[in-house]
Amino acid sequence: MTTNLRLPGRPEDLTLPALLARNAAEHPDLPALSWRTVDGGGAGGDTGGDGWETLTWSEARRRVAVLAAGYTALGVARGEHVLLMMGNRPEHWLSDLALVHIGAVPVTVYGTSAPEQIAHIARHSRARLAVVEGARELARWAPLLDDPATPLERLVVAEAGEAGPHTAYASLYASGARLHRPDAFEKAWQESRPADPLTVVYTSGTTGDPKGVRLSHRNILLQSVRLDRHVELPEHAEHVCYLPFAHIAERILGIYLPLLRAAHVRLVADPAAVAAAVRELRPVQFFGVPRVWEKLAAGVRAVLAGLPEEQRRAIEGAGDVARARAGHRERGEEVPAALEASYAEVKERVLDPLLRLAGLDRLAWTASATAPMPIEVVRFWAGWGITIMDAWGLTETSGVCTVNSNSPGGFRLGSVGRPIEGLELRIAEDGEVLARGATVFDGYLRPDGTVEGAADAEGWFPTGDIGRLDEDGFLWLTDRKKELIITSNGKNVAPALVENTVKEHPLIGQALVHGDGRSYLVALLVLDPELAPAWAAARGIETTTLADLAAHPAVLEETARAVEAANARLNRTEQIKRYRLLAEEWGPETGELTPTLKLRRRVVREKYGALIEGLYEGE
């Protein structure tokens, strides 16, 4: 358990503002929120001389109180949805809490959302106000002000000088500073109840229009307390906050858990800058979705490929020792003294100096969620003494349902862990995982503001994931129910299993397997943009682009060997019969991935439809 801080009541009886009040009263001078600014401006705070501006907990609460008065002056009412589209910047974090304090419901929209997705959420949520970052966002939001089908009435713009005819964030803040009354602020947040909505999180839309998941204060407080009990960290540990606040994982890790722990949030506005931030800050905790861990592993492998053979052998030997130690701990066995001594020696001499260069040497808790983590990636990091604690959950369950814990016998690499306290799991006849508990949401938001329940009469919510529970209570996931491939001869295939198997080869960065209603599977494979050039350079292949590599005979031969090796580990139905190697990496900007880096299968199939059909010629 990370925190032994006093709670101002039972978790199920609290609202989120009670935690901010406690932090400001009992930990007023501890750092709460830090961010970088170019001009030294922003939301105000102490620059500290290290390039970061920082608000203490007392300062953060004062900013929240001022903003609460500003939003009230704009007419924001209790229970009203307010849309936010900003990066991980102080205006977002503080506005989110300010809206909660006046009983409004913040709804963050992914910054990569297309205009039609924004319009859907604006209409569905019935929001009258949206707070956006700058000109890029205004181009997508401003047309909705003139759309008779959209209730949107006003835009607030965070970036200085970008507001034009709209309300500037600085103006809203100045208005709040004039109108703020401490007694009115305290009265407003104390009127909220645990069952009131705290936020609505729209799912990322991998299979259709985003759905609005309404989560209450009670859902989130119970989730935060129960998750905290599974994690051992120093008090007030820093969190590097870089994932979108539109995702439940960052809302829990970057807003709600820090309030519970009185922890320090470091905002990283550009996700591409997270590696540099980690190198600088050397955090003790780090969360990354599987694709983030895959990319980090690819970067490390690319560096290793350029090292002298003797040094590579030393690192590989150290990795074998680290993995052997992790295996004992995974099985709940005492690590033999000789192995523990060997690990301590290689950790100090070989691993830590290299990890320190990447800022990863102090990590005590590392985790992943949102999609199955390739076991090869997990084993890679175990070889560096970093055990990634895979977890599983959904927006609808307020975040995690199951976690692996960093104790002997408390994890199984490849599984997603055991259920958190108060959460029950059951496997339906068709293999779907069902969940029940106080952290499961009440239902999906309807356009009229009511909620449509999603659980059955006994409270079981169908998660849409397929999996199994082992004899020790660990959950092993196979795939998403809607993504299962059913071949023409009626066989079920989990595409993620096949994709992760072929991605174990360093050349292959991404993969999509297709075969629904067909007699065999085909695949689209994407070269890894970091590792493929390193692999080629190590073999004396001189190319300038990934497109050149994707057509190079040696790369094609190696890809064929990678597919053959993967097929050897798969049953006949799961094997890839034909494939095509691509050079262009898939991403959120081009639409193939969600903002949290999950594969949008429908988009990929539509984009490469002709190519996929060509792989079935002569079927």
Image (spheres, grey):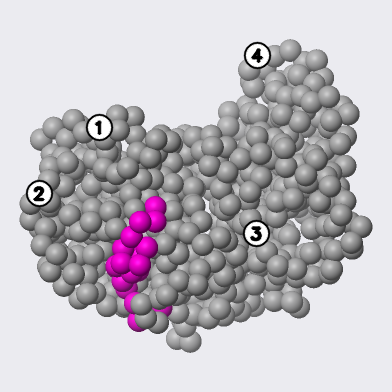
Q: Residue at x 83, y 32 (%)?
A: 312
Mark 1 to mark 4 CA distance (whole Å): 35 Å
Q: Is residue 489 magenta?
A: no
Q: Which amino acid does label 1 sit on?
A: Ala
Q: Which of marks 3 and 1 is in front?
A: 3
Q: Can residue 504 be seen in this view?
A: no
Question: How many other residues sit within 10 Å of disc 3, few (<14), some (14-19) or many (≥20)?
Answer: many
Judge by depth and name the residue closer to the eye, 111 or 90. 90
Q: Where is residue 337 in the image (x, y as percent from the top left)?
A: 89, 61
Mark 4 to mark 3 CA distance (whole Å): 38 Å
Q: Name the residue under label 3.
A: 389
In the image: residue 495, left or right of residue 259: right
Q: Mark 1 points at which residue?
A: 135
Q: Which of marks 3 and 2 is nearer the N terminus?
A: 2
Location of residue 70 with respect to 112 vertically, above or below: below
Judge by depth and name the residue closer to the eye, 383 or 599. 383
Label 4 element class? loop
Mark 2 to mark 4 CA distance (whole Å): 55 Å
